[in-house]
Amino acid sequence: MDNTILYIIAILVIIIYAAVLFLQMVKKAEKERTRRRRLAYQQIVKPIPLAMPVLDSRQVRKQRPVTAPAPDVDFLKNCQDFQQSLRALAGKYSLDSFTIATSDGLVIASSGGSTAQEDAAIYSWKYDGKEPAGMALFNLNHKGSDLVGIVRSQEIITGETQKCIESDIKNILTKWI
């Protein structure tokens, strides 16, 4: 009889000890969740809305040469910021998307599109003059930084049009950066 009471007391002590350990783990997990939350002084990140939907140009359709750019598009005077200038450039040349990246693959700016970061990571550091279908790539230098222009278009970009795009992007970079 005495041994039975001792066994019951020992089992109760073990159960209480396990419950205390469990409560400590729960408290520790709650502290970790609280720590991961945004701190009071941190701003809420607002996503940048896309101005226009961009088709995924991986689905290359019948390609045709880009028509001559519209002369009345003035993305230097009529645009409020860098992003708007890039969207106007994409509109001027009927581009699906346009991305400016550093030579090590970081996106500086994009006219929109879901593939900007992927394009920058893949094409900027190993650009060797060969262009994938539906894309045009070119190197440029701005204030001593080597940059890569990545153009996605369902239309063929001629050499003349590409030179115009390069010139226009240099003007945009000079104005905004």
Image (cartoon, rainbow, N blue to C red):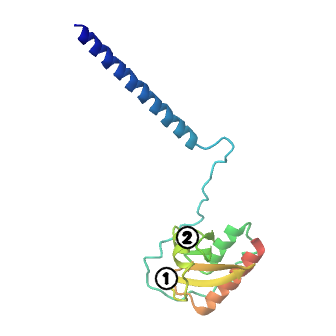
Mark 2 touching mark 1, by CB under 8 A?
no
Q: Which mark is residue 116?
A: 2
Q: Residue at x 67, y 80 (%)?
A: 146
Q: Residues within 10 Å of mark 1 (few under 14, many from 20)?
A: many
Total labels drawn: 2
> What amino acid does circle 1 point to?
Gly
Is tag 2's residue or tag 1's residue first in the polypeptide sequence?
2
Residue 110 appears in the figure: no
Say whether residue 148 is visible: yes
Q: Quadrant of the N terminus?
A: top left
Secondary structure beneath disc 2? helix
Q: Quadrant of residue 13?
A: top left
- Residue at the image point whose x is 54% and y is 36% from the top: 31
Q: In the orientation shown, which residue stands out farthest toward the left?
A: 1
Q: Nearer the viewer, residue 124 or 24?
A: 24
* Image position, residue 157 (x, y; %): 56, 87
Q: Residue at x 57, y 83 (%)?
A: 137
Q: Residue furthest front?
A: 3
Report the disc number at residue 134. Answer: 1
Classed neighbour count for the residue bearing mark 2: other residues with Cα under 10 Å, few (<14), some (14–19), many (≥20):
many
Lateral position of residue 167 relative to residue 90, left or right: right
Residue 128 place in picture, x, y as percent: 55, 87
Spatial CA span between label 2 and label 1: 14 Å
Amino acid beneath label 2:
Ala
Residue 21: quarter of image? top left
Q: Secondary structure at mark 1?
A: loop
99, 107: nearer the viewer = 107
Q: Which mark is residue 115?
A: none
